[in-house]
Image (spheres, helix red, strand yellow):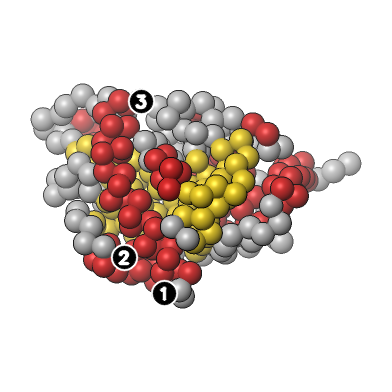
């Protein structure tokens, strides 16, 4: 009889083997793109494009604005792996299913992971289009992807999270923004909620009181798995809107996607410069 967890381990192993059979030279830098941020893929000189649906055990992306493909190629001359599209708790997946692609990246040898998302601003000093470099997070999903049997080869049972986002990567990102003269770049704390319903005024007020600067419905499970697997993580939130709980305005997904596309050029420039600095050892 197989132990609990063996099946999931086999799923991850088979997915990683499938990808490595297609491309044996996997880049050490990877980017996961969030809602409305897929235009970065237009700058990639694609060597390989693998639809998620063709990779064993990968979940199916149901969000229309997500491409749903793994890309390997050159981003402004630097090789990178791009996860164009992600999976969400609100789609009905468990956090373990959501994070399977990240665990696969670990087995493929990825060392640095850039996780991006579109988020709602909670900090009243933020403006739409602000890029928030994540310093810390709050997990309000009610589920942790490390729950259940631990695979010791992948990471420790109780991983340390005193620095979930590498201070060195945060500094490199800030230096990259300064070098490229990218305005409205800040740091802050990201809160992850289950969704898909957006926050009420009372919830917005409470999240502010908890110390969150931005709120979204993704990224934290992926960060947990990446850090458990000893990957270095940079988190980037593109602030799509800022709501005052005392003067609340309706939030539409279409507006979030549109703001992401308007500000994506600045975010793309930041990511390209950041990866170049990683390649140079910066």
Q: Which mark is residue 80?
A: none
Q: Residue 176 carries which label?
A: 2
Label 1 crowd (10 A; few <14 / some 14-19 / many >=20): few
Label 2 crowd (10 A; few <14 / some 14-19 / many >=20): many
Relative placement, left or right, of 67 versus 155 is left
**Is residue 139 in view from this perspective?**
no
Q: Earlier in the sequence, mark 1 or mark 2?
A: 2
Relative placement, left or right, of 49 versus 138 is right
Q: In which quarter of the image is residue 34?
A: top left
How far is mark 1 from mark 3, CA to CA?
40 Å
Point out the frontmost of discs 1 and 3. Answer: 1
- On the image, the x and y values in percent for residue 107 come to 67, 56
What residue sits right under mark 3 in the picture?
197
How far is mark 1 from mark 2, CA to CA?
10 Å
What residue sits right under mark 1 in the picture?
282
Q: Earlier in the sequence, mark 3 or mark 2?
A: 2
* Front residue of this view, candidates 127 and 8: 127
**Element assignment for label 1:** loop
Q: Which residue is drawn at 33% across and 55% down?
A: 269
Tag 1–tag 3 contact (CB < 8 Å) = no
Q: Residue at x 20, y 41 (%)?
A: 128
Q: In which quarter of the image is residue 93?
A: top right
**Is residue 67 in view from this perspective?**
yes
* Front residue of this view, candidates 217 and 204: 217
**Element assignment for label 2:** helix
* Front residue of this view, candidates 98 and 270: 270
Q: In this view, does 246 lie above or below 132?
A: above
Point out the frontmost of discs 3 and 2. Answer: 2
Q: In which quarter of the image is residue 204?
A: top left
**Element assignment for label 3:** loop
């Amino acid at each position: 009889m197989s132990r609990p967890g063996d099946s999931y381990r086999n799923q991850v192993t088979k997915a990683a083997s499938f990808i490595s059979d297609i491309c044996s030279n996997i880049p050490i830098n990877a980017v996961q793109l969030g809602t409305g941020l897929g235009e970065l893929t237009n700058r990639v000189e694609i060597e390989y494009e693998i639809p998620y649906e063709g990779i064993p055990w990968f979940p199916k992306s149901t969000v229309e604005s997500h491409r749903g493909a793994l890309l390997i190629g050159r981003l402004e001359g630097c090789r990178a792996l791009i996860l164009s599209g992600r999976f969400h708790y609100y789609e009905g997946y468990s956090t373990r299913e959501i994070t399977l692609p990240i665990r696969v990246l670990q087995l493929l040898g990825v060392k640095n992971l850039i996780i991006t998302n579109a988020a709602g601003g909670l900090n009243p000093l933020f403006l739409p289009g602000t890029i928030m470099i994540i310093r810390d997070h709050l997990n309000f999903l009610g589920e942790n992807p490390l729950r259940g049997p631990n695979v010791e080869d992948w990471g420790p049972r109780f991983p340390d999270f005193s620095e979930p986002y590498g201070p060195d990567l945060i500094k490199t990102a800030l230096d990259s923004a300064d070098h490229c003269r990218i305005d409205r770049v800040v740091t802050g704390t990201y809160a992850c909620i289950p969704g898909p319903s957006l926050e009420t005024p009372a919830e917005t007020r409470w999240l502010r009181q908890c110390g969150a600067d931005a709120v979204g419905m993704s990224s934290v499970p992926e960060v947990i798995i990446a850090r458990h697997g000893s990957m270095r993580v940079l988190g980037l939130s593109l602030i799509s809107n800022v709501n005052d709980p005392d003067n609340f305005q309706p939030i539409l997904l279409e507006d979030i996607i549109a703001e992401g596309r308007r500000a994506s050029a600045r975010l793309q420039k930041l990511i390209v410069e950041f990866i170049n600095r990683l390649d140079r050892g910066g």
